Image (tube, coloured by chain):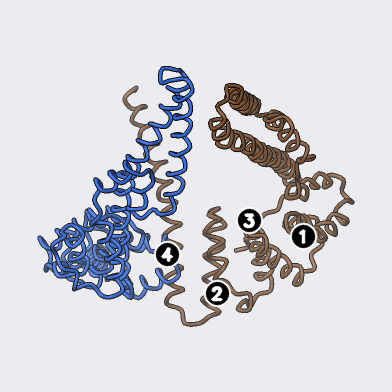
Chain colours: A brown, B blue
């Protein structure tokens, strides 16, 4: 009995693995077959139909990189069916947004709106998401319409991320100019800040000590070689740390915003339109 | 039942005689459809009786810079070794990647192929960079300039550079062709030498500060000599690689894989 159960389990596992491999293979084979049809067909409209078929297949398989590639081969002028064209523009706008090609996303979205005059929340939400990182005036127009639903107010963070700047940056730099290392400490990098204080302090004291011992040549040379390098290096480090801090805070903001957007998209899902 | 069996055998026969469509492959390459290209080649099983399958697979490896796989499979496929333009393309691209792998391909060609690469520009250039006695007359004028540059560096002696750096800090850099580094090396050594001289003059050699400044000066002085010798070695390798890269570029220009 035990022997039978073990064998049965092994058999199921192997079958699941084989089924998964076959699924991937089937998808690849179907893509290849469509490409062969594209190669054989002489008619542009027919070719366009096959391009669209490939595009939709890749969307179904969530192979978005490939979808974006196939998208570039499809031409709107060869469509005979207006519903298919609408769906194509919608999917094209969405996939371009997903792969972060916002200019293309905007072009396809505008083409979709021109064709459908769609004013549904889903459509406006897609427009808002595309324009959030692209065009602040269009974003504000979308927001005006969408504030009817207060749940959408949380999307304000989208427009804030690209423009986020750390406040009072010059203050950090001046702190480092007055007390070397202080600006770096303020950015949160305490060890490097203290390191700057100790390095510049001891180098200055050493040079002063040489002067006291009447080693004037050494005073000049060590002073010239070390102090300006350490001092200006410390300011440069403060600027570098400030940039890092700004990036870190922007990334944090982006994560929070992404979570908010995800929550919102659960309530107002934006899906691909695959009618076939 | 008999008809079904007949159909089955017919299908097997049909599939084993199916041929690779080279214009379809060209279409896949033109549109950069790498996944489809791979699927297409894999759609023919290895047991299928198609002579050109391995040939197209090798071309695929070359296209995707999988040179190791290409080299592993090239010796068993005489079709590739008979295709002179493919050999030109592969040696040109291999040389940009690895000198030793290019030599391996030349060896494979001499053992299993028609020894086409024996008189090739690449083989002659590889011999030329290793043997100073060989003449460079076979090189076209555009490659001659690069070779002259390499030869100028090749003839420089490490011990001359080291001796010059010992006599005058920075002079070694001037000799090896790093003129811009001369002033930096010279001034740094003068600065540290001056501090060492001043401290010894003031406190004597046994003073801690004197030992420190002399130590720093010695470290910079010796590293300048070592740096000159090390730099020359590096420049020689750099110039050799640059020359061979230019040869590879010359060889593969105008030669297309598909």
Q: Nearer the viewer, residue A211 or A15?
A: A211
Chain bearing mark 3:
A
Question: Where residue A206 appears, x then y in whole percent?
Answer: 58, 24
Asked which quadrant contains residue A261, the reply is top right
- Disc 2 versus disc 4: distance between alpha carbons? 16 Å
Question: Where residue B139 appears, x then y in whole percent?
Answer: 23, 72
For label 4, the crowd category at 10 Å Cα-Cα, with few meaning under 14, some 14 to 19 and many 20 or more, is: many
Determine whether the residue tagged by mark 3 lies in a helix, strand or loop: loop
Are the residues under marks 3 and 1 on the same chain? yes
Asked which quadrant contains residue A87, the reply is bottom right
- Disc 2 versus disc 3: distance between alpha carbons? 24 Å
Where is mark 1, residue-wise? A135
Where is mark 2, residue-wise? A48
Q: Nearer the viewer, mark 3 or mark 1?
A: 1
Where is mark 4, residue-wise? A32
Label placed on residue A100: 3
Question: Where residue B107 appears, x then y in whole percent?
Answer: 14, 58
Quadrant the N terminus of chain A occupies:
top left
Determine whether the residue tagged by mark 4 lies in a helix, strand or loop: helix
Are the residues under marks 1 and 2 on the same chain? yes
Question: Where residue A203 appears, x then y in whole percent?
Answer: 59, 27
Q: Residue at x 63, y 56 (%)?
A: A100
Earlier in the chain: of badge 1 and badge 2, it is: 2
- Disc 3 versus disc 4: distance between alpha carbons? 27 Å
Chain bearing mark 2:
A
Earlier in the chain: of badge 2 and badge 3, it is: 2
Earlier in the chain: of badge 4 and badge 1, it is: 4
């Amino acid at each position: 009995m035990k022997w039978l159960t073990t064998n049965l389990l092994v058999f199921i596992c192997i079958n699941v693995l084989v089924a998964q491999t076959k699924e991937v293979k089937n998808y690849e084979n179907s893509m290849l077959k469509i490409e062969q049809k594209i190669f054989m067909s002489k008619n542009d409209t027919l070719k366009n139909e096959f391009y669209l078929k490939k595009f939709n297949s890749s969307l179904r398989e969530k192979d978005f990189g490939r979808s974006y590639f196939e998208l570039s081969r499809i031409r709107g002028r060869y469509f005979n069916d207006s519903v298919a064209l609408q769906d194509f523009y919608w999917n094209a706008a969405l996939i371009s947004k997903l792969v972060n090609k916002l200019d293309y996303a905007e072009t396809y979205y505008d083409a979709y709106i021109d064709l459908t005059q769609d004013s549904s929340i889903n459509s406006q939400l897609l427009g808002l998401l595309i324009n959030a990182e692209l065009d602040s005036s269009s974003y504000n127009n979308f927001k005006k319409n969408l504030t009817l639903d207060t749940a959408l107010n949380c999307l304000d963070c989208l427009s804030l991320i690209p423009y986020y700047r750390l406040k009072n940056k010059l203050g950090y730099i001046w702190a480092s100019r007055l007390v070397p290392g202080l600006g770096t400490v303020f950015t949160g990098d305490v060890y490097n800040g203290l390191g700057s204080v100790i390095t510049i302090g001891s180098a200055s004291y050493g040079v002063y000590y040489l002067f006291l011992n009447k080693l004037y040549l050494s005073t000049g040379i060590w002073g010239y070689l070390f102090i300006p390098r350490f001092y200006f290096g410390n300011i440069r480090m403060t600027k570098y740390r400030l940039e890092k801090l700004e990036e870190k805070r922007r990334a944090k903001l982006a994560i929070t915003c992404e979570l908010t957007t995800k929550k919102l998209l659960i309530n107002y899902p934006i899906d691909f339109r695959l009618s076939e | 039942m008999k008809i079904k069996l007949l159909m089955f055998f017919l299908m097997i026969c049909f599939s084993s005689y199916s041929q690779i469509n080279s214009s379809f492959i060209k279409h896949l390459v033109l549109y950069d459809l790498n996944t489809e290209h791979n699927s297409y080649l894999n759609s023919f099983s290895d047991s299928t009786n198609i002579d050109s399958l391995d040939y197209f697979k090798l071309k695929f490896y070359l296209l995707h810079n999988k040179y190791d796989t290409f080299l592993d499979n090239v010796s068993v496929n005489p079709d590739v070794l008979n295709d002179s333009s493919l050999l030109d393309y592969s040696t040109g691209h291999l040389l940009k990647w690895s000198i030793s792998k290019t030599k391996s391909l030349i060896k494979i060609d001499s053992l299993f192929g028609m020894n086409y690469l024996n008189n090739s520009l690449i083989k002659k250039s590889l011999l030329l960079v290793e043997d100073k006695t060989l003449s460079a007359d076979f090189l076209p004028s555009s490659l001659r300039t690069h070779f002259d540059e390499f030869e100028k560096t090749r003839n420089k002696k490490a011990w001359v550079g080291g001796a010059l750096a010992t006599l005058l800090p920075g002079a070694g850099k001037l000799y090896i062709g790093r003129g811009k580094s001369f002033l930096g090396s010279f001034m740094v050594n003068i600065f540290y030498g001056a501090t060492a001289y001043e401290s010894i003059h003031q406190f004597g050699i046994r003073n801690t500060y004197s030992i420190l400044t002399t130590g720093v000066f010695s470290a910079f002085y010796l590293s300048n000599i070592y740096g000159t010798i090390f730099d020359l070695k590096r420049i020689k390798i750099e110039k050799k690689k640059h020359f061979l890269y230019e040869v590879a570029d010359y060889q593969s220009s105008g030669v297309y894989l598909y």
